[in-house]
Amino acid sequence: MWIKVRLRRRGSQNERVISAYANGGFRAGRPTIILPASLAGELGFEIERGRLIEGLAAGGLSVQVRELGHVEVKVEVSDR
């Protein structure tokens, strides 16, 4: 399901409202958010300093991603 969410890096005032796909049917263990590098940079993450880890994409494809830290996520609700 596509929803609007507000993202903010902890300790930063910089935030973005984006469309996000939630509840895609995959279980990842702990909650995980995958951001495009350009958006991570806009939120103030230092991409090159992120720890490189192995991840799984849809279909079981193995990919390398960078673990950048925590991000606050709030669902945008139009009637509230």
Image (cartoon, helix red, strand yellow):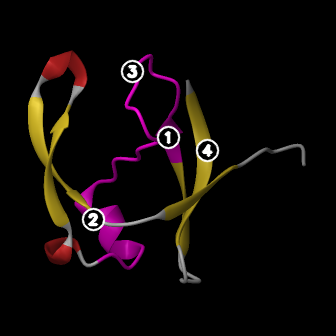
Q: Does residue 48 appear to the left or right of 68 in the view shown?
A: left
Q: Type of residue at label 2?
A: Ser
Q: Which residue is mark 3?
A: 26
Q: Which residue is mark 2?
A: 38
Q: Residue visible at 45% across and 64% down? A: 70
Mark 4 neighbour class, 10 Å CA radius: few under 14, some 14 to 19, many 20 or more: some
- Mark 2 or mark 3, earlier in chain: 3
User: In the rendered structure, does residue 4 fall within the stretch colored magenta?
Assistant: no
Q: Which residues are magenta?
A: 19-45
Image location (x, y in percent) of residue 50: 20, 69
> What residue type is disc 3 on?
Phe
Q: Report the residue at 60% width, 50% height from top.
A: 5
- Which element type, helix, strand or loop, lies under badge 3? loop
Q: Is residue 58 above or below residue 31?
A: above
Q: Quadrant of residue 77?
A: top right
- Cβ–Cβ below 8 Å for labels 2 and 3? no
Q: Which mark is residue 20?
A: 1
Callout 3: 10 Å neighbours few (<14), some, many (20+)?
few
Residue labelled with disc 4: 4
